[in-house]
Amino acid sequence: QVQLVESGGGLVQAGGSLRLSCAASGRTFSSYAMGWFRQAPGKEREFVATINWSGVGTYYAGSVKGRFTISRDNAKNTVCLQMNSLKPEDTAVYYCAANSRAASTTGTYYDYWGRGTQVTVSS
């Protein structure tokens, strides 16, 4: 069982930055691939970024590549999403998720989810 708690969301102007964190409980955090997803009002949940268990392998959605960076610290049971050059279209609730199999862009493959943190980017 893994419990995930996101933090770091907020209101920022376009062009600004935010750093999201996800704290995970459990001793087996390092065995999970982790992902960030987001859901905007009236839209389906979409993949943002994923990182494998070691932190070496990462993959990003095209819409955020070059602006967002996912990282993890297995000693601290945390995964972070550094978001730079934010745009109004990045406004959404951002969710952290854990995958016991492998890094994936598919949300249904993830086993555990946090409750989300709101990110609002004003124009």
Image (spheres, rainbow, N blue to C red):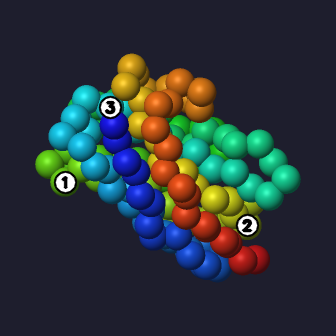
Classify 10 Å Cα crowding around label 2: few (below 14), some (14-19), many (20 and above): some
Which residue has dot 1 on it? 76
Residue at 66%, 71% in the rendered image? 120
**Badge number at residue 32:** 3
Q: Amino acid type of disc 3?
A: Tyr
Quick check: 31 left or right of 57?
Answer: left
Find numbered disc 2 in the image and state the secondary structure of the residue it sits on: helix
Confirm or deny contact between disc 1 and disc 2 (CB under 8 A).
no
Classify 10 Å Cα crowding around label 3: few (below 14), some (14-19), many (20 and above): many
Q: Amino acid type of disc 2?
A: Pro
Which residue lies most toward the front here? Answer: 1
Confirm or deny contact between disc 2 and disc 3 (CB under 8 A).
no
Residue at 22%, 35% in the rendered image? 28
Residue at 54%, 51% in the rendered image? 95
Which residue lies most toward the left here? Answer: 75
Kindly report the distance in space between the C-alpha atoms of the residues bearing marks 2 and 3.
31 Å
| Residue 6 appears anywhere in the view | yes
